[in-house]
Image (cartoon, grey):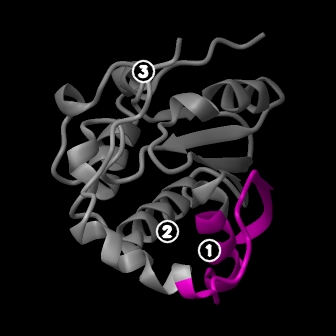
Amino acid sequence: KKSAKYVSDYDNNNSGIAKFLLKYCNPNWSMSNITPDSEPFFFKGGETGALLIHGFTGTPNEMRELGEFLYNKGITTMGLLLPGHGTNVKDLLNIRWLDWDNAVKNSIAKLKNHCDKIFLIGLSMGGTLALHQVVSNDGKVKAVVIMNTPVFKLNNFFAKLAPLFKYIIKYTNKRKKS
């Protein structure tokens, strides 16, 4: 079994991956702002690469075990930290979906420097972002795997009211796991 490392460990080899992931995916943050177990990861394997995209309010840590598994099968894996995630829930208040989309797009470009074939694996909202990239990425992505991804058309009356909720409820904290 290969030994997988966190991005910060991998950067000891001067790969620059951690700096890239933080600069282009979360430009206003440093590793000191990220909560423990939330940092992005990069495991250099073979010529096939997988970008793992976490869900809303999640972190790369929820994708890390899958990333390590794929890495041990010879696949280069990258788990990005989406903007607004991995710090404080208030950091999500000024983030738009295009910020997440750009973070995924930038990560695909970086992964393309290491791999010939790229596939995306997205969990929940990460799956929605992955699907969006497949239809808008000029063939750079060869396949997509989505897990627990909401795929439906919002055409009812209450869905149209959803944008108004940002003026009523700014955010709620996640419940602590017991």
Label 1 SS: helix
**Residues under numbered marks 1 and 2 in contact, where contact means CB atoms less than 8 Å apart:** yes
> Is residue 81 inside the magenta stretch?
no
Q: Name the residue beneath numbered marker 2.
A: 105
Q: Name the residue beneath numbered marker 1.
A: 133
Q: Nearer the viewer, mark 2 or mark 3?
A: 3
**Residues under numbered marks 2 and 3 in contact, where contact means CB atoms less than 8 Å apart:** no
The one nearer the camera, 140 or 166, is 166
Q: Nearer the viewer, mark 1 or mark 3?
A: 3
- Name the image quarter holding the N terminus: top right
Label 3 SS: loop
CA separation, marks 1 and 3?
Answer: 26 Å
Name the N-terminal-most of marks 1 and 3.
3
| Residue 142, picture quadrant | bottom right
Q: From this viewpoint, is residue 35 visible?
A: yes
Q: Name the residue beneath numbered marker 3.
A: 37
Name the N-terminal-most of marks 2 and 3.
3
Vertical arrangement, residue 84 with respect to residue 177, above or below: below
Magenta stretch?
128-157
The one nearer the camera, 24 or 131, is 131
**Rendered location of residue 163, percent (x, y):** 37, 78
Q: Residue at x 68, y 32 (%)?
A: 67
- Mark 3: which amino acid? Asp
**Rendered location of residue 48, percent (x, y):** 76, 49
The reply, left or right, for residue 40 in relation to residue 33 is: right
Q: From this viewpoint, is residue 138 visible?
A: no
Vertical arrangement, residue 80 with respect to residue 161, above or below: above
